[in-house]
Amino acid sequence: MKRRNFIKLSAMGTAAVAVSACENSLIGQKQSTILNFPISSPKIISTWNHGLAANNKAWEVLNKNGSALDAVEQGVRTTESDESNRSVGLGGLPDATGKVTLDACIMDHKFNCGSVSFLQNIENPISVARKIMEETPHVMLSGKGAYNFAIEKGFKHKELLIPETKLAWEKLMSSNSQKKPQINSENHDTIGLLAIDNKGNISGACTTSGWAYKLHGRVGDSPIIGAGLYVDNEIGGACATGLGEAVIKICGSHTVVELMRQGHSPNNACKLAVERIIKSNENLEGLQVGFIALNKKGEYGAYSVYSGFNYALKDESSNKMIDAAYEMEW
Ligand code: GLY
């Protein structure tokens, strides 16, 4: 069968594959017809406008026939290494003690996943997450253990607090004020990126420096498989951005993927997950959360609690920003 025609089916045939997919379904719902349609040509979707550069890098990989896994890793590394970005990797805003602590995770088309949380002094946590996935029996390493593992694997120690962010932190500390995260298009948080390669396989990556000036030791949704990111290659993938505490409470990205499994479009699945965020939080003031989703057919969508969330979409013809639909005006 040709690549763009139908998903490769095992020798057991379509029916057997559909039955086994149904049995594997975590929610026990009847499998939708989602297994039986033309698969997508390569496509990339990522959160916020830093996604444009990440998409371009990821596309270079896909264009050379690379895997979605390589594409998502290379894509978000661009954001992690971008010193001008205040919410991811190098140049990210520190915690309340002035330390930049990073969270990241990666997931491929076979449910393999790797994750780092509370990692310091390593510029590209996403690549450490991938090494954990590929070279250890674990999914997640945290803190000093994750750092030691990274150094052992050849990653370099790096000071991630740059002069501008050090100054901003010192100013805030001297003002003695509490800082609530302001998460929107001018002050975004987290890059989540999903890609489909030319075999139709989906992978995802998610990386952040988290809530600016958070308590030392705080970990958000971004390194938690099922919260910040989830991929089921039969269905699609989803990523979250925004207030991690709210995303963790509803296992956000996994929820979006399961809603797509039930037959919802990516857009509607993101909307339903946002509605669940709204239902599960009494105080919604400033509580911005956004989801992006991409299904096996290449359909994509996004939805956020408040206006102001946007995402970058790359395909053969363009790399462009799209404003997400939302529930309330910011
Ligand atoms: N969404 C990123 C965080 O809350 O840390």
Image (cartoon, rainbow, N blue to C red):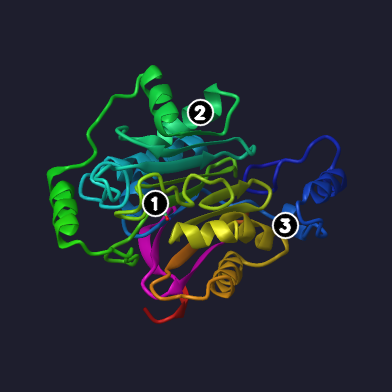
Q: Is residue 325 above or below residue 140?
A: below
> Who is closer to the viewer here, 146 or 23?
146
Name the residue: 63% across, 42% down: 3
Residue 18 appears in the figure: yes
Local SS, label 3:
helix
Mark with earlier residue (3, 1): 3
Give the left or right position of residue 158, taking residue 28 as reference.
Answer: left
Tag 2 residue: 132
Q: Residues within 10 Å of mark 3 (few under 14, many from 20)?
A: some
Q: Where is 275 relative to 60, above or below?
A: below
Magenta: main secondary structure equals strand
Q: Secondary structure at mark 2?
A: helix
Quadrant of residue 2 within the rendered picture: top right
Say if the magenta span includes residue 308. Answer: yes
In this picture, residue 10 sits left or right of residue 203: right
Q: Does residue 176 lie above or below 107 as drawn? A: below
